[in-house]
Amino acid sequence: MSGKLILHVEDNQYNRKIIRDLLSKHSYEIMEAHNGEVALDALARRRPDLILMDVQLPKLSGLEVTRRVRADPSLAQIPIIAITSFALSGDDRLALDAGCNAYVAKPFRPRDLLEMIRGFLGP
Amino acid sequence: MRIRRITRFRTKVLLSIIPMILALCVLFGGMSLYQHNRLLHSEFVKRGKALASNLAASSELGVFSEDERLLNAALRGITGEEDVAYVLIYNDIGKRLIGGGKALVQPGLTSTTETLSPELRAQMLTDRQPTSTIMKEAGTESFLEFYAPILSTEVRLVEEQYFGMPQSTRGPGENRSRVIGFARVGLSMRNIDAHSAYLIKLWAILSVVFLVGGALAAYALSRRITQPITRLTESTARMAEGQIDQEIPVDSQDELGTLATTYNEMAKALTRTLDERARVAIELRDLNRHLEDRIRERTSELVETNRQLARASRHKSEFLANMSHELRTPLNAILGFAELIMDGVYGTVPDELRESIEDIHINGRHLLRLINDVLDLSKIEAGQMRLNLGECSIQSLIDSTISATRSLAAEKRLELASRVETGLPPALSDSKRITQVLMNLVGNAIKFTPRGGSITVTARRAASGERRAASVEPEPPTPDPEASDFIEIAVADTGIGIPAEELKSIFAEFRQVDSSITREYGGSGLGLSIAKRLVEMHEGSIWAESQVGKGSIFYFRIPLRTQSGGSL
């Protein structure tokens, strides 16, 4: 169907698998990174159509990766959806301030996330 | 000023004593002087008369015979007297026969050369008595003069004998003598005048001595009075300046001495009292310092304890936050996989598995809510929850709550309605937290209302102090008198209700009316507790009314404020 490339930055393998299973079912191409540095390496290699960014990451935080993406003119236009951990702690605002376009709080319904991705990339 | 008053007292004493002494001196001195002078004079006169009479007697023969030798002899008898100035003898017709005496050689004493004055001669011829005192001035000297008639008896007898003078002209017992001449004696007043002058001088000297002596005595006396008073005054002044330990010398046993003694005793008593007071003050200060030390000690202990507690609390919160994150990550996976299975991502789910997977999903969500609630509560308790204040429409908060819960209500065929007062102003609040409270209250209402019941959410503006009857919570506090108005939101249901004795504790943690309810209705038991904390963070209040079997109404109020009216 769409074949669009989505970069998923997430340190937990099971969560990565859930997104992988969900998105491949809906014909998206997945690129994965388990921390911020790997994510930047991946970005240097391929330009994705959308980034799913876990905020809490080891080594380089998702917020910092977001700021760097926004600072790079070739990547600045890529939509970024933040996946926040603490729904009640203000991470959502931090994510938007860092340059994310939207956020979903863990635990999210896979269905809701799919809706949000379709909102950015089209059906 | 005090010193001057005492000086005035001394002056007063002197002024009253000196005139008294002066009056005494003048009065008594003058009187005795006068008396003395009179006595002197009368003695002088007596002497003068006697001298004149003697002269008259001794010169009788001389006059009779007009023999100068005899007359000179008679004169010599008295011219030797010191104060006799001059002596004169006249015959019966007043002619001067002889004169002598120191004064006669002096020039200017003219009267001595004269004949006897006819008036005096006539007088003495009649009364035949010595007469006195006619003052003669000659230069600077004064004299007192004495006259005496010179009588002769022998001559008369001879005349009768030889010339046969009839005797019938004289009465029986009559003196048969006749005046044959006159003696005149002048006494110098130099001595008596000198004596008088001496007396006056003496009197003057004595007066001055008495005056000075009296003044000195009065001065000494007043000094004896004023000196102790001055000492007392000066000592009192020193005492007033703070030198309490005063002692003044006691040099008499009179009233002033008693006063000084009493004063010394008073000063001693005062000193003792002050010493005592100072001692007590020192003790008090020591006690205070000790107390302060102990308070400081305790305070630092408390501060330390507080710091430890704060650290422990922070650790607890951090632990809970981390823990909830760690719990949520696997839970996220569980829920995610369950949902993917149910959504058919892994193919069609067999009917015999579908219910079990749904159970996994339901319990997973329950566990997630529990974790969230525990995290919220621990954040509130650690003071780490901050309100994100903004002006928001209560109407829209209620609307979004109702639309989010509508499907749940519809499942139980519950009527869900809202009634918001028109013109309700926007409230300064954290919309996310107020929505959380509303979701909790509406969720509870849906949970505890049987099928076919109804739930109504109302909002209105309420004045402070106004309160619905039969409330259980105490009067909502009004921390800011400016914010006298509230927005009051009520969630009413037709549910199972809450027994009166349970109403008090429903806002406490982990309280549900019956623990069996948790099993039947689900829920963490923390929702109301969190709602209460959130409302209180808005400086509002929350309370409930209920009737078992009929339903419950949960109210909460938040103060109506504008952005400029201060933040929370």
Image (cartoon, rainbow, N blue to C red):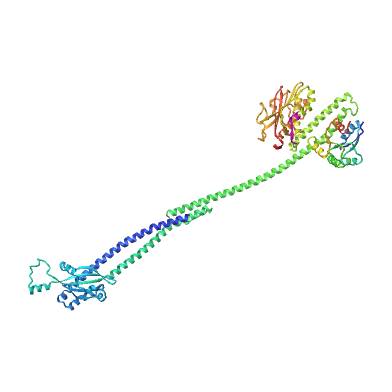
Residue B334 horizontal/vertical position (percent): 85, 31
Which residue occupies 84% across, 34% down? B330
Range covered by the magenta-colored residues = B388-398
Quadrant position of residue B483 = top right
Q: Quadrant of the C terminus of chain B?
A: top right
Give the number of marks: 0
Indicate left or right for B288 with B91 as reference: right
- Relative to residue B161, is residue B425 drawn left or right? right
Answer whether residue B391 is magenta in the image: yes
B270 falls in the magenta region: no
Image vertical order of residue B376 relative to residue B413, above or below: below
Task: Report whether residue B445 is seen.
Answer: yes
Using the image, determine if residue B480 lies above or below residue B136.
above
Foreground residue, B97 or B507?
B97
Residue B22: x %, y % from top left: 36, 60
Which quadrant holds residue B76?
bottom left
Instruction: Looking at this view, name the residue that lies furthest to the bottom.
Output: B69
**Residue B322 visible in the shown view:** no
Q: Quadrant of residue B312?
A: top right
Q: Nearer the viewer, residue B328 or B449?
A: B449
Q: Position of residue B502 (x, y in %)?
A: 70, 27
The x and y percentages for residue B398 are 75, 28
Nearer to me, B436 or B164: B164
